[in-house]
Image (tube, rainbow, N blue to C red):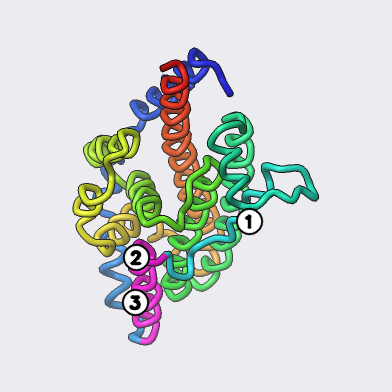
Amino acid sequence: MESVDYLKVELKKIEAWEKEQKDLWFLEKIGRLPFMLLDKLTPKFIQDKIGLAIDELGSYIQTGGQYLVNEETILKKFVPEGSVLTADEIRVELHNHVPISKMDEVAEELGNSRTKMATIQGATTGIGGIFTLAVDIPVLLGLSLKVLQEISLCYGYDPKEKSERIFIVKCLQFTSSDIVGKKAILEDLASFHQGSQNNQIVSQLQGWREVVTTYRDSFGWKKLFQMVPIAGIIFGALINRSSMSDVAEAGKMLYRKRRIHDRLKQMESIRE
């Protein structure tokens, strides 16, 4: 296990990253405009498809829905090939023995992989302009939820638990919030370090639909450029790459912070 001094230095790096999070520039404030346009121009059958896809996200907090990832695939990255350790045993290793540097390495690998997938997805849906944009939004949300679950597993947390899914949605919300929103979310997430999450955080979410709408609208003006057929390939790829990279970075930093706090608590209890 790492030394207390090392953990405290790494914690300060994360806190510095949190302070560096800047306000969204003014164009972000017109983010809803493309989606008002989308609602007016998109045929009803496509709107219905978007509605069904986004409604599925609503079940994520309650049950995980179709977005739960295969934890075995992720956890096996932390043991030698051919190991007979069970998922629970690997999770114990993550809690107590696996260096945080190894967790960082696997989380970075997974983040890069999902970012490449999102880039390809953006380029593909950019071909058809406004019509394929309608498909891109829920797919990008789904990829974001999956990478955050994978990162949670890397740091020894279980996305099958409802409290972890709430943390994941808050991470997603963090990436699309302005500076005031980011500060409020960081304060909310502090309760996870203190072990007092549960009902307070649940009530602060104010419904999953608000979270999804905020996330969608936050990069709405960028998606406006993706509505141009063919040219949308380039814009779609770049925008999705940037969005997924931001989500993966936030997930890694916020989960890393939790694991460091937990390690420090472990060391304190051992000394006592």
Q: State the CA–CA distance, disc 3 to disc 2.
A: 18 Å
Q: Secondary structure at mark 2?
A: helix
Q: Name the residue carrying label 1.
A: 72
Q: Mark 2 or mark 3, which is nearer the start of the sequence?
A: 3
User: Which mark is nearer the camera, 3 or 1?
Assistant: 1
The reply, left or right, for residue 204 in relation to residue 195 is left
Q: State the CA–CA distance, disc 3 to disc 1.
A: 31 Å
| Residue at 60%, 60% in the rendered image | 120
Q: Residues within 10 Å of mark 1 (few under 14, many from 20)?
A: few
Q: Secondary structure at mark 3?
A: helix
Q: Amino acid at mark 3?
A: Gly
Checking the image for residue 51, the label placed there is 3
Q: Quadrant of the C terminus?
A: top left
Residue 89 to residue 4: above or below: below
Q: Amino acid at mark 1?
A: Glu
- Most frequent secondary structure within the magenta stretch: helix
Whether residue 228 is visible, yes or no, is no
Q: Position of residue 106 (x, y in %)?
A: 63, 41
Whether residue 14 is visible, yes or no, is yes
The reply, left or right, for residue 84 in relation to residue 206 is right
